Amino acid sequence: MHLKLSFLAVSLSLILQLELHQDFAQAASILGIFSYHLSSHFLVLRTFAGALVKRGHNVTLITPEGMPPDIEGVRHIRIPKLNKRVQDMLESDQLLDFFGNKWMESVMAVTMLSNMSNDILTDDAVQRMLQDRSEHFDLVMMEPSGLEALYGLVEYYNATLIGLSGGTVSWNTEELAGNPAPNIYEPISPIGYSWDPSLLNRINNWIHICEEKLLKNLIVRPAQARIFKNIFRYSEQKFEELRQKYSLILINNHFSMGRVRANVPNIIEVGGLHLSEPPEPCDEKLQKFLDEAKHGVIYFSMGLDIMVQFLPENMQQQLMQSFAQLKQRIVWKNEFFNIPNRTENIYVIEKAPQRHVLAHPNVRLFITHGGLLSVMEAVYSAVPMLGLPVFFDQFIIMRYVKQGGMAEILDTNALNAEILTTSIRELLENPKYADRAKKMSQSFRDRPMSPLDTAVWWTEYALRHRGVNHLRLNVEDISPIRYYNLDWLLLFGLRFGIVIGSVIYIGFKIFMKIREKQRRRRDRERVSLQIMLLQSRSKIY
């Protein structure tokens, strides 16, 4: 009887503790700051924020105007200046240089990041939030990138900090997670970075990363530190401390997409968050076009943020010439309905229900710019890809899925109809691409929890275990000798040095001994010669 009562008491205690943990997580106030004007990033955020609201959290989002659209249950703080910054950049005469030149890209990025941080922290609505003493936040989540002045909000509210990365992992993300591993460096910008593993290219890539680090440490961070000190009046030491406060970073990626990484425990892969929402509906006309495609369908889209009008005119002509040679039907996401020389096999649509199209059994190929969400949706639906990357991380993303065996990549600057048509036919007719796409899709889908459930669970884990320091590899607590295994190298070097030193010493001694013998022999020969000369002279006299 007593044993039963004891067991019941323990069970009730555990249930109560779990409920208390759950109630704490459900009652949390969360502040999200996402300033980048990228539609794909906000598709992920919209899904994630909506799930947090359903869990009972109070969510406040600081974002540009209109991005994302209002989410039910979320308090939105819109920053109009962020929209103006993007508009100014698009209208800039230096825009083409920005996309083609690493240094121009860096200069413009530094300016944009400084302006964004300042615009957010000086916004009237944000200032009212800071001055309202009734406001508090248990957790701050943000993109782990260049807006480091915003870390002041973490200290101001004494909150837990987590990252939600809408892109790929770079060396900077690794540093923020507490994992500055030099053997898996990945660049922030792919411009000038080489994927060829030769020795010269490895040296070039090391220089590339060093340049990025110099730009980050000498230009980006000092600019952010000035804003940080001006707004929050905290010291520069506090600025450096807050950079190490990330409890965990949610990465919108997954190892099944062709890139296996050495992640530390606080980097959590949640690629496919947005796939938890139902796909967009498809109208009857498009559905009929897909259903009646006897030879299959090719879907062509350059994403939400790249308009066809911004593509080189020559590229559009090459695409039209190539599509005219194909028997497959083409669904082309294009804002121009009246395309010159358009053939009957092309269906033009301004806003395509992409997930619905990719999931259709008649779709054989996806021609894409290589945006992360587009690639993810193609992997999910097992559709081979032809990549036409234009800028930023699109080159890296497409390279990974090419390594995975379900894609090929073409250079948009050297595109012609013959190369394009040959590549399309290779992807359509060679079964290895479709087979590999099916295997990658199965791997991508096969998980113990959905990406959304994983992201929510880890967010609430960070709330329950405030700080989550036990997940971080705190390099500051590890001496450089231990972290880089220099003790082993020093021991090996000492042994090697003793051996080499001994060999050199013995060799030197032998050399000196031989030299001494040679010197004595020469001396004897010289003395003998002198004696002989003296003897010969004495005979003469």
Image: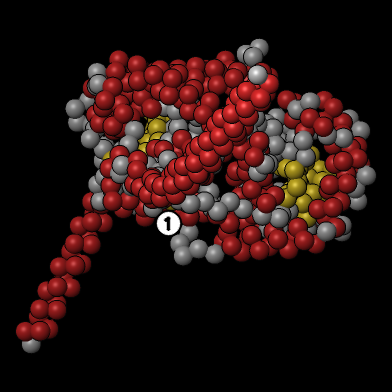
Q: Position of residue 222 (x, y in %)?
A: 39, 19
Q: Nearer the viewer, residue 367 or 189?
A: 189
* Residue at the (34%, 43%) spot, across then down: 481
* Vertical position of residue 221 compared to residue 56: above or below: above
Callout 1: 10 Å neighbours few (<14), some, many (20+)? Answer: some
Q: Is residue 541 above or below residue 253?
A: above
- Check the image and report above or below for 35 versus 417: above
Q: Residue at x 77, y 51 (%)?
A: 365
Mark 1 element type = helix
Residue 303 image offset from top left, x and y in percent:
66, 38
Most distant residue in the top direction = 93
Q: Is residue 349 left or right of residue 487?
A: right
Q: Residue at x 19, y 62 (%)?
A: 17
In the displayed structure image, the side of residue 39 where residue 295 appears, left or right: right
What percent of the width, then of the height, locates residue 510?
A: 50, 44
Q: In which quadrant will I find the C terminus? A: top right
| Position of the N terminus by quadrant | bottom left
Query: Residue beneath label 1, please?
Result: 453
Q: Amino acid at mark 1?
A: Asp
Q: Judge by depth and name the residue closer to the eye, 424 or 42.
A: 424
